[in-house]
Image (spheres, rainbow, N blue to C red):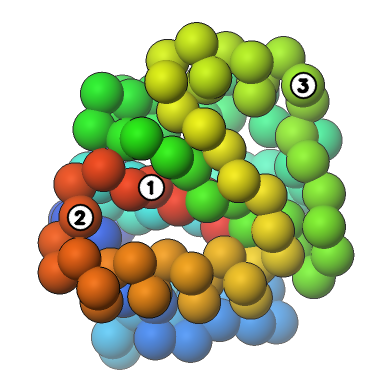
Amino acid sequence: MAKPRFDDQPLIDAYGDGYFRFGAQRLEGSILLTPNGIYPWEIASLEEASLGTIGPLLDCAGAIDFLIVGSGTSFARWPKGLTEHLQNLRIMPDFMDTGAAARTYNVLRSEEGSPQNSEKIVR
């Protein structure tokens, strides 16, 4: 398994123009933000998502109830089979544009302090 760039789940301080900022660190491109940390996500669009590309997410499946998926500047979904696989693991994905996903994630983190049952993938 890849090593996360951050441990835990920090708040998203800024996002846009292909980057996310967590404190003083700026991460370019898509990311998987999991209960175990933040990982680079090497896809260009959600249509490229597969079981092979979401390994860090699958590694913490028991700690996730729902999944917030940011799809960039416009709404998109990943392949139906991937959603069905996650639902079989009792993970319910919710798709929205990345701005809404980042804001929703931060609100949930702020309200719950340190939620162990939330996950976010942002693109």
Q: Is residue 102 left or right of residue 36?
A: right
Q: Residue lying at the far front in this picture: please name it.
A: 111
How much space separates mark 1 and mark 2, taking CA atoms? 9 Å
Identified by mark 2, the residue type is Pro
The residue tagged 3 is 80
The earlier-in-sequence mark between 3 and 1 is 3
Q: Is residue 39 visible?
A: no
In the rendered image, the vertical position of residue 71 relative to residue 26, given as above or below: above
Q: Residue under circle 2?
A: 115
How many residues crowd mark 2 within 10 Å: few (<14), some (14–19), many (20+)? some
Of the image marks 3 and 2, the number of the one nearer the N terminus: 3
Q: Which residue is mark 1?
A: 119
Q: Is residue 64 left or right of residue 103?
A: left
In this rendered view, identify the residue nearer to me: 30 or 93: 93
Give the image location of residue 60, x and y in percent. Answer: 28, 29
Q: CA distance from mark 3 to mark 1?
A: 19 Å
* Residue at point 82%, 49% (across, down): 76
Q: Quadrant of residue 13?
A: bottom left
Q: Which residue is rendered at x = 64% and y = 15% of the image?
A: 84
**Quadrant location, the N terminus:** top left
Q: Residue at x 81, y 35 (%)?
A: 47
Where disc 3 sits, the SS reads helix
Label 2 secondary element:
loop
Q: Residue 45 in the image: state x and y as whole percent.
A: 78, 47
Three-letter amino acid code at the position of disc 3:
Lys
Mark 3 neighbour class, 10 Å CA radius: few under 14, some 14 to 19, many 20 or more: few
The residue under the point 32% across, 35% down is 64
Q: CA distance from mark 3 to mark 2?
A: 27 Å
As drawn, 88 above or below 90: above
Discs 3, 1 touching: Cβ within 8 Å: no
